[in-house]
């Protein structure tokens, strides 16, 4: 076995008004189970799913209820091309609304990221195949919040988004 590792930084495509969820699973039924978890989360949620099969024909399996998001999920999965990796694109909903459902899908092993930020995936490749080493999600920290920032955060959560009372 070769000791050489090839590294690649892959930019994910993220349409406006969308979020992306990137994760790792272990079984071909992932696409169907993620579909069921998402379609029952909200009647307005639009999504596309792509899953990189890790053995046999090694196809990118896909599903969803929005053709444009399915197409983007497939393109992102093609860029990653790492076995058992899944990509979900969401519109008219947020990861916070579906993450527990996704993490409770029996074959889901890990969620790497759930974001509306630009995202990059650090991929490594060995003789065996490709894997996800990690993700870059957003900008570097620029400081520590002060009292005014705390007040802004609380107002956002309570008054604008309505997640807190």
Image (cartoon, helix red, strand yellow):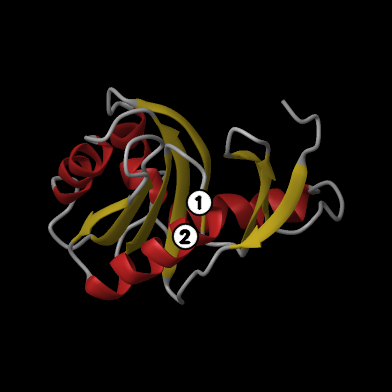
Q: What is the quadrant of residue 92 in the picture?
A: bottom left
Q: Secondary structure at mark 1?
A: loop
* Residue nearest the viewer, comparing 70 with 1: 1
The residue labelled by disc 2 is: 78
Q: What is the quadrant of residue 101 in the picture?
A: top left
| Residue located 12% across and 58% down the image | 43
* Residue 165 relative to residue 133: left or right: left
| Quadrant for the N terminus in the image | top right
Q: Are marks 2 and 1 in contact (CB under 8 Å)?
A: yes
The residue labelled by disc 1 is: 81
Residue 148, horizontal then vertical, whole percent: 75, 55
Is residue 155 visible to the viewer in this orientation of the structure? yes
* Residue 155 relative to residue 52: left or right: right
Residue 110, horizontal then vertical, whole percent: 48, 30
* Residue nearest the viewer, comparing 70 with 103: 70
Q: Secondary structure at mark 2?
A: helix
* Residue nearest the viewer, comparing 66 with 92: 66
Crowding at mark 1 (Cα within 10 Å: few <14, some 14-19, many 20+): many
């Amino acid at each position: 076995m070769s000791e050489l590792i090839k590294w690649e930084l892959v930019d994910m495509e993220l349409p406006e008004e969308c979020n992306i969820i990137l994760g790792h699973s272990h079984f071909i039924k992932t696409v169907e189970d993620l579909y069921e978890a998402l379609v029952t989360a909200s009647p307005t949620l639009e999504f596309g799913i792509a899953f990189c099969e890790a053995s046999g024909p090694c196809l990118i399996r896909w599903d969803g209820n929005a053709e444009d998001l399915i197409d983007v999920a497939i393109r992102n999965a093609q860029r990653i091309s790492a076995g058992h990796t899944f990509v979900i694109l969401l519109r008219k909903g947020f990861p916070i609304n579906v993450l527990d459902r996704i993490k409770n899908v029996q074959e889901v092993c890990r969620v790497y990221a759930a974001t509306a930020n630009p995202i990059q995936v650090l991929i490594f490749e060995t003789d065996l195949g490709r894997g996800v080493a990690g993700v870059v999600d957003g900008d570097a920290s620029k400081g520590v919040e002060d009292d005014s920032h705390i007040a802004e955060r609380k107002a956002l959560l309570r008054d604008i988004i309505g997640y807190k009372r």
